[in-house]
Amino acid sequence: MKHIHSLFLLLSFCITPQISQANTIGYVEDFALAPDREAVLKDLIPGTREYYYYHALHAQNEGRHGEVEKLIGLWVKRYGETSRVREIRNRAALLEYEKNPKKSLEYLKKKLGLRFNHSRVIEGRKPAHPTKLDPKHVSYDSYYQDAIRAYKNLQGFEQRGLRNLDANKLNGIQLRDFLARVIYPDIPGLPDLIHKDLK
Protein backbone atom coordinates (compact mmCIF):
# COMPACT_ATOMS: atom_id res chain seq x y z
CA MET A 1 0.00 0.00 0.00
CA LYS A 2 2.91 2.34 0.84
CA HIS A 3 4.41 1.67 -2.59
CA ILE A 4 1.15 2.62 -4.34
CA HIS A 5 0.89 5.81 -2.27
CA SER A 6 4.52 6.81 -3.08
CA LEU A 7 3.96 6.03 -6.77
CA PHE A 8 0.85 8.21 -6.79
CA LEU A 9 2.79 11.12 -5.19
CA LEU A 10 5.63 10.74 -7.69
CA LEU A 11 3.23 10.79 -10.65
CA SER A 12 1.42 13.86 -9.32
CA PHE A 13 4.74 15.77 -9.07
CA CYS A 14 5.64 14.78 -12.66
CA ILE A 15 2.27 15.73 -14.16
CA THR A 16 1.66 19.03 -12.30
CA PRO A 17 4.43 21.08 -14.09
CA GLN A 18 3.19 19.88 -17.48
CA ILE A 19 -0.39 20.96 -16.69
CA SER A 20 0.78 24.37 -15.47
CA GLN A 21 2.94 24.83 -18.60
CA ALA A 22 0.05 23.86 -20.87
CA ASN A 23 -2.14 26.60 -19.39
CA THR A 24 0.31 29.46 -20.10
CA ILE A 25 0.15 31.03 -23.56
CA GLY A 26 3.24 33.20 -23.24
CA TYR A 27 4.16 36.86 -23.56
CA VAL A 28 1.23 37.68 -25.84
CA GLU A 29 -1.12 36.84 -22.95
CA ASP A 30 0.91 38.97 -20.50
CA PHE A 31 0.83 41.89 -22.94
CA ALA A 32 -2.87 41.60 -23.78
CA LEU A 33 -4.08 41.27 -20.18
CA ALA A 34 -1.64 43.68 -18.48
CA PRO A 35 -3.27 46.67 -16.78
CA ASP A 36 -0.03 48.61 -17.39
CA ARG A 37 1.49 47.59 -20.73
CA GLU A 38 4.42 49.98 -20.37
CA ALA A 39 5.60 47.90 -17.40
CA VAL A 40 5.24 44.62 -19.33
CA LEU A 41 7.19 46.03 -22.30
CA LYS A 42 10.23 46.45 -20.01
CA ASP A 43 10.55 42.63 -19.95
CA LEU A 44 11.55 42.59 -23.63
CA ILE A 45 15.19 42.67 -24.73
CA PRO A 46 15.90 45.78 -26.89
CA GLY A 47 16.72 44.95 -30.51
CA THR A 48 14.82 41.65 -30.65
CA ARG A 49 11.99 40.97 -33.09
CA GLU A 50 9.49 40.82 -30.20
CA TYR A 51 10.74 44.16 -28.86
CA TYR A 52 10.02 45.94 -32.15
CA TYR A 53 6.69 44.18 -32.70
CA TYR A 54 5.15 44.80 -29.29
CA HIS A 55 6.50 48.35 -28.98
CA ALA A 56 5.06 49.18 -32.43
CA LEU A 57 1.76 47.52 -31.51
CA HIS A 58 1.55 49.45 -28.25
CA ALA A 59 2.41 52.73 -30.01
CA GLN A 60 -0.38 52.08 -32.52
CA ASN A 61 -2.85 51.36 -29.73
CA GLU A 62 -1.84 54.65 -28.12
CA GLY A 63 -2.16 56.55 -31.43
CA ARG A 64 1.56 57.47 -31.61
CA HIS A 65 1.93 56.85 -35.38
CA GLY A 66 5.17 58.82 -35.77
CA GLU A 67 6.86 56.54 -33.25
CA VAL A 68 5.62 53.50 -35.20
CA GLU A 69 7.34 54.76 -38.38
CA LYS A 70 10.66 55.14 -36.51
CA LEU A 71 10.36 51.65 -35.01
CA ILE A 72 9.55 50.12 -38.42
CA GLY A 73 12.62 51.82 -39.93
CA LEU A 74 14.93 50.31 -37.29
CA TRP A 75 13.12 46.96 -37.41
CA VAL A 76 13.42 46.60 -41.21
CA LYS A 77 17.06 47.71 -41.14
CA ARG A 78 17.89 44.91 -38.71
CA TYR A 79 15.59 42.04 -39.80
CA GLY A 80 14.24 42.94 -43.23
CA GLU A 81 10.60 42.98 -44.38
CA THR A 82 9.12 40.20 -42.20
CA SER A 83 5.49 39.09 -41.95
CA ARG A 84 5.09 40.95 -38.64
CA VAL A 85 6.45 44.16 -40.19
CA ARG A 86 3.82 43.80 -42.92
CA GLU A 87 1.16 43.23 -40.25
CA ILE A 88 2.10 46.49 -38.50
CA ARG A 89 2.20 48.35 -41.84
CA ASN A 90 -1.28 47.04 -42.72
CA ARG A 91 -2.62 48.09 -39.32
CA ALA A 92 -1.03 51.53 -39.76
CA ALA A 93 -2.71 52.01 -43.15
CA LEU A 94 -6.12 51.27 -41.62
CA LEU A 95 -5.61 53.18 -38.37
CA GLU A 96 -4.31 56.33 -40.10
CA TYR A 97 -7.01 56.40 -42.78
CA GLU A 98 -9.14 58.97 -40.96
CA LYS A 99 -6.26 61.48 -40.68
CA ASN A 100 -4.50 60.74 -43.97
CA PRO A 101 -6.81 58.82 -46.38
CA LYS A 102 -4.65 59.52 -49.45
CA LYS A 103 -1.58 57.86 -47.89
CA SER A 104 -3.61 54.84 -46.74
CA LEU A 105 -5.26 54.38 -50.13
CA GLU A 106 -1.92 54.64 -51.97
CA TYR A 107 -0.48 51.98 -49.67
CA LEU A 108 -3.45 49.66 -50.23
CA LYS A 109 -3.34 50.17 -54.03
CA LYS A 110 0.36 49.30 -54.05
CA LYS A 111 -0.03 46.38 -51.65
CA LEU A 112 -2.99 44.82 -53.47
CA GLY A 113 -1.70 45.66 -56.97
CA LEU A 114 -4.82 47.62 -57.87
CA ARG A 115 -4.87 49.37 -61.25
CA PHE A 116 -7.70 51.66 -62.30
CA ASN A 117 -6.68 52.06 -65.94
CA HIS A 118 -9.68 50.49 -67.70
CA SER A 119 -10.98 52.41 -70.67
CA ARG A 120 -14.63 53.31 -70.94
CA VAL A 121 -16.62 51.60 -73.69
CA ILE A 122 -18.65 54.16 -75.64
CA GLU A 123 -21.28 52.65 -77.89
CA GLY A 124 -20.83 53.46 -81.59
CA ARG A 125 -17.26 54.77 -81.26
CA LYS A 126 -14.42 52.83 -82.89
CA PRO A 127 -11.73 51.85 -80.38
CA ALA A 128 -8.35 53.56 -80.78
CA HIS A 129 -6.44 50.38 -79.91
CA PRO A 130 -6.44 46.88 -81.47
CA THR A 131 -9.29 44.59 -80.47
CA LYS A 132 -7.70 41.30 -81.60
CA LEU A 133 -4.25 39.77 -81.69
CA ASP A 134 -2.22 39.76 -84.88
CA PRO A 135 -1.63 36.06 -85.77
CA LYS A 136 1.93 36.92 -86.85
CA HIS A 137 2.83 37.89 -83.27
CA VAL A 138 1.35 34.81 -81.57
CA SER A 139 2.61 32.13 -83.95
CA TYR A 140 5.15 29.42 -83.07
CA ASP A 141 7.74 30.97 -85.40
CA SER A 142 7.40 34.35 -83.69
CA TYR A 143 7.91 32.83 -80.22
CA TYR A 144 10.78 30.70 -81.55
CA GLN A 145 12.60 33.75 -82.93
CA ASP A 146 12.04 35.66 -79.67
CA ALA A 147 13.50 32.78 -77.62
CA ILE A 148 16.53 32.41 -79.91
CA ARG A 149 17.23 36.17 -79.84
CA ALA A 150 16.84 36.53 -76.07
CA TYR A 151 19.32 33.84 -74.96
CA LYS A 152 22.57 32.32 -76.22
CA ASN A 153 21.46 28.87 -75.10
CA LEU A 154 17.95 27.31 -75.11
CA GLN A 155 16.81 28.87 -71.84
CA GLY A 156 13.84 30.46 -73.64
CA PHE A 157 12.36 27.01 -74.36
CA GLU A 158 10.43 24.88 -71.90
CA GLN A 159 11.35 21.21 -71.55
CA ARG A 160 8.53 20.00 -73.80
CA GLY A 161 9.41 22.67 -76.39
CA LEU A 162 12.80 21.03 -77.00
CA ARG A 163 11.10 18.21 -78.91
CA ASN A 164 10.00 20.67 -81.63
CA LEU A 165 13.56 21.84 -82.34
CA ASP A 166 15.69 20.61 -85.21
CA ALA A 167 18.85 19.76 -83.27
CA ASN A 168 20.96 19.68 -86.46
CA LYS A 169 20.43 23.44 -86.93
CA LEU A 170 21.63 24.41 -83.43
CA ASN A 171 24.97 26.10 -82.83
CA GLY A 172 27.55 24.69 -80.37
CA ILE A 173 26.22 26.44 -77.23
CA GLN A 174 22.61 25.58 -78.05
CA LEU A 175 23.46 21.94 -78.83
CA ARG A 176 25.30 21.56 -75.50
CA ASP A 177 22.28 22.96 -73.64
CA PHE A 178 19.92 20.77 -75.69
CA LEU A 179 21.83 17.56 -74.83
CA ALA A 180 22.08 18.53 -71.16
CA ARG A 181 18.32 18.95 -70.90
CA VAL A 182 17.16 15.96 -72.98
CA ILE A 183 15.33 13.46 -70.76
CA TYR A 184 14.31 10.68 -73.19
CA PRO A 185 16.75 9.05 -75.65
CA ASP A 186 14.28 8.83 -78.59
CA ILE A 187 15.79 11.89 -80.32
CA PRO A 188 16.49 11.22 -84.02
CA GLY A 189 20.24 10.91 -84.63
CA LEU A 190 21.14 11.31 -80.93
CA PRO A 191 24.53 9.48 -81.17
CA ASP A 192 25.57 11.78 -84.07
CA LEU A 193 24.54 14.85 -82.05
CA ILE A 194 26.61 13.67 -79.07
CA HIS A 195 29.58 13.03 -81.37
CA LYS A 196 29.18 16.50 -82.91
CA ASP A 197 29.11 18.07 -79.43
CA LEU A 198 32.21 16.15 -78.32
CA LYS A 199 34.11 17.37 -81.38
Image: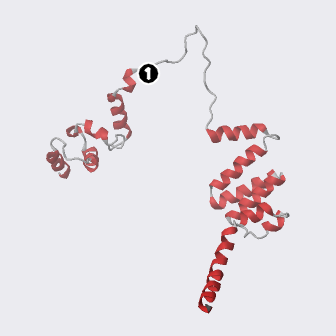
Q: Which residue does the image show at 16% across and 41% down from the upper left?
A: 188
Residue 53: x %, y % from top left: 71, 59
Residue that sits furthest to the bottom in the current view: 2
Task: Examine the rendered structure and indicate whether residue 75 appears above or below residue 103.
Answer: below
Q: Is residue 81 visible?
A: no
Q: Dividing the picture into quarters, in which one does residue 98 lie?
A: top right
Residue 101: x %, y % from top left: 78, 38
Q: Nearer the viewer, residue 100 or 170?
A: 100
Q: Is residue 100 visible?
A: yes
Q: Which residue does the image show at 65% across and 62% down from the upper left?
A: 78
Q: Which residue does the image show at 78% across and 41% down from the upper left?
A: 97
Residue 64: x %, y % from top left: 83, 53
| Residue at the disc numbered 1 | 133
Task: Examine the rendered structure and indicate whether residue 108 appears above or below residue 58.
Answer: above
Task: Examine the rendered structure and indicate whether residue 50 appears above or below residue 145.
Answer: below
Picture mark count: 1
Left or right? Give the position of 172 relative to 124: left
